Image (spheres, rainbow, N blue to C red):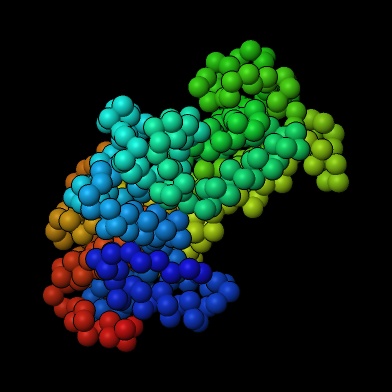
Amino acid sequence: MKTFNVPTTYRSPLISAIKQQRKADDKLKKDFSPTLIDLGAVQFFLARHFGFCYGVENAIEIAFRTVEENPDKRIFLLSEMIHNPFVNQDLNALGVRFLMDTYGNELVPLEEITKDDIVLIPAFGTTIPMEVKLKALGIPIEKYNTTCPFVEKVWNRSEQIAQKGYSIVIHGKPTHEETRATFSHSSASAPSVVVNDMNETIELAKFITGEKPHNQFYEEFAGRYSEGFDVAVNLQRFGVVNQTTMLASDTQAIADYLKKTVKEHFALDETSISERFADTRDTLCYATNDNQTAVAGMLKQEANLALVIGGRNSSNTSHLVELCENQLPTYFVRSADDILSRQEILHGNWRTREESIVSNWLPAAEPVRILVTSGASCPDSMVEGVLRKLHGFFGHALPFDGVIKEYL
């Protein structure tokens, strides 16, 4: 796979060495057990896969290269490059300005943009109307487009099945930049509707079977269906695609539920189901799937707690927290700075995005066994920073730099 040139401050020699060794030992990615860093009084279990993915590294390389190559130009980002506050702050510090916030609210009027400016498309992509507006301003969006290739793969798959007469059901968070972009692109090709979770999927299925009156659909899914969507027609034949950072198991469960509904309602068998339901399993992002599977492997270890590192508004990171907290105490931190002391930690609630200080979070009895992973937009250097800070709380621990020599 291609390697990228990202700022060295985001790299960690320790984490890079561990990842390279695991990759060499497990070329087919069949071993999802974690890596143990045993420091005596504290033991860290690092997930098999975590941190920057292909799409994130691609976006970061393009963004920082663009800044370096255009010192005399104004550079804007449509919205956050990725959902990591430290990467976005670094870009801000270099003079890059955001045109919109993460919800699409305008921060800089488009009227201020000229053809001499540079506008970067973030890794999440953008909507077709926004592309049209930027092109009308003379902005060459193709040159500075950092949209993740796996997001574009979802768009392409949507277009392919649309050409065969299928509508599109999108599993995603309706307000997320990526889902808004995917909805825009799929709507250009086919009638489309967004479902957030299984509960909404179950309700959507009731419009397929006729259990609910069709007119009720437009109220329940207001703002989440494409213009001209005809519930009586457009749910007769469709496929399911996803926001790439959702739980892969959730997307699969939603697709399976809708497939079963269609199969039973229309009395179809496995050979005829494709008449009404498109196979779109290939839209699941490899990195999202790998990171989530790695967490499942990590959770097989006996441990006292889990730490998940990443941006508060990162969708893929929040799902890693969700997986961990189902099994053991889990803390969602952005960096080592959120680890206030051995007694207190600043934890982010992935559901509400509220922060709270949790006391007595580290057990007194040693050794303390900690599971560690991070989101796809979290620099490896921050993971190492967390490990080092935690190590400092254990006076009887083995020397950090001494132990990690075996990994370097």
Residue at coordinates 58% horizontally, 49% vertically from top-left? 153
Residue 64 in view here: no
Q: Would you identify the image quadrant in which residue 160 lies?
A: top right
- The picture quadrant where one finds residue 227 is top right
Q: Residue 383 at x, y = what percent?
A: 29, 64
For image coordinates 55% across by 15% down, the residue present is: 219
User: Which quadrant of the rendered structure holds the C terminus?
Assistant: bottom left
Q: Residue at x 45, y 56 (%)?
A: 55
User: Nearest the camera: 94 or 247?
Assistant: 94
For the point 33% across and 73% down, the residue is: 15
Above or below — where is 306 with respect to 365? above
Q: Is residue 47 above or below residue 72?
A: below
Q: Position of residue 236 (x, y in %)?
A: 75, 28
Decide if residue 243 is in sight here.
Answer: yes
Q: Position of residue 212 (x, y in %)?
A: 67, 18
Residue 119 in percent (x, y) is at 35, 42
Above or below, 49 relative to 36: above
Q: How many marks?
A: 0
301 or 282: nearer the eye? 282
- Is 65 left, or right, of 293 in this rendering? left
As displayed, is residue 167 above or below residue 366?
above
Q: On the picture, is 179 further left or further right than 229?
A: left
**Towards the viewer: 40 or 169:** 169
